[in-house]
Image (spheres, rainbow, N blue to C red):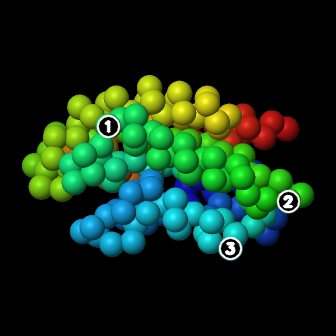
């Protein structure tokens, strides 16, 4: 809950200014059906998750790493479009304050690394993942979402090339907190 702690720095413990709900799920894709790992389609899971937490001021979405798996035969454009579809779905809801749509922050995951640990699952995704920020930024602009390139702040773990270590999670939380504060000044 590093993000919650950063956003609520200086607030009274019983009166946080920000509530943060984490809805991470290992293996979740943006919008792809995974024949190996089962029901991990983020777009399909999105609306029930959002409705259960309404009202929501902001939804930060960092998906796409699992879309890099060779079994999906992905292009960076297709991965970014999947994330854009999630942003648009959020923007079509009335799950925000006053029955309006929540704001959306699209976070491009940091590039994967070449590592033998998960190569059997992610193949040679490192080069493909380096192309994502350009397409994510364009998709965010197209749908009016805010954008954050996590790769400018953190790197994936050299151990498995995909996941984030504790220090990277904290650095990412700090970057996301700064984006949130910019979206909600004052």
At horizontal 27% and vertical 34% (from top left) the residue drawn is: 128
Q: Is residue 170 left or right of residue 49?
A: left
Dot 3 or dot 1: first in sequence order is 3
| Contact check, label 2 and label 3, Cβ < 8 Å | no
Structural distance between the alpha carbons of marks 3 and 1? 33 Å
Q: Is residue 41 left or right of residue 67?
A: right
x and y percentages locating residue 106 in the rendered image: 56, 42
Disc count in the image? 3
Find disc 3 in the rendering and name its residue. Answer: 52
Structural distance between the alpha carbons of marks 2 and 3? 14 Å
Is 33 in front, or is 107?
Answer: 33
Question: Considering the numbered disc 3 on the image, is that residue within a helix, a strand or a loop?
Answer: helix
Q: Is residue 96 left or right of residue 115?
A: right
Against 114, is 19 above or below?
below
Structural distance between the alpha carbons of marks 2 and 1? 36 Å
The outermost residue toward the right is: 98
Q: How crowded is mark 1: few (under 14 residues within 10 Å), some or many (20 or more)?
A: some
Question: Considering the numbered disc 2 on the image, is that residue within a helix, a strand or a loop?
Answer: helix
At horizontal 70% and vertical 69% (from top left) the residue drawn is: 51
At horizontal 45% and vertical 39% (from top left) the residue drawn is: 80
x and y percentages locating residue 131 in the rendered image: 34, 29
Dot 2 or dot 3: first in sequence order is 3
| Contact check, label 2 and label 1, Cβ < 8 Å | no
- The image's mark for residue 75 is 1
The quarter of the picture where residue 117 lies is: bottom left
Find disc 2 in the rendering and name its residue. Answer: 99
x and y percentages locating residue 52 in the rendered image: 68, 73
At horizontal 54% and vertical 33% (from top left) the residue drawn is: 139
Question: Considering the numbered disc 1 on the image, is that residue within a helix, a strand or a loop?
Answer: loop
Q: Is residue 157 visible?
A: no
Q: How crowded is mark 2: few (under 14 residues within 10 Å), some or many (20 or more)?
A: few
């Amino acid at each position: 809950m590093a993000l919650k702690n950063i956003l609520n720095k200086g607030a009274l413990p019983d009166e946080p200014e920000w509530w943060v709900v984490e809805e991470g799920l290992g293996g979740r894709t943006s919008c792809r059906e995974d024949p190996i790992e089962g029901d991990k389609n983020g777009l399909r899971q999105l609306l029930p998750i959002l409705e259960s937490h309404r009202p929501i001021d902001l939804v930060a979405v960092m998906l796409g790493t699992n879309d890099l798996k060779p079994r999906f035969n992905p292009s960076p454009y297709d991965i970014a479009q999947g994330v854009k579809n999630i942003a648009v779905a959020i923007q079509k809801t009335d799950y925000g304050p006053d029955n309006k749509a929540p704001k959306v922050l699209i976070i491009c995951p940091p590039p994967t690394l070449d590592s033998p640990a998960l190569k059997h699952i992610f193949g040679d995704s490192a080069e493909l993942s380096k192309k994502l920020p350009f397409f994510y930024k364009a998709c965010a602009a197209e749908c009016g979402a805010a954008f954050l390139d996590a790769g400018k702040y953190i790197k994936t773990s050299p151990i498995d090339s995909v996941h984030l270590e504790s220090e990277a999670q904290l650095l990412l939380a700090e970057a996301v907190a700064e984006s949130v504060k910019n979206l909600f000044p004052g």
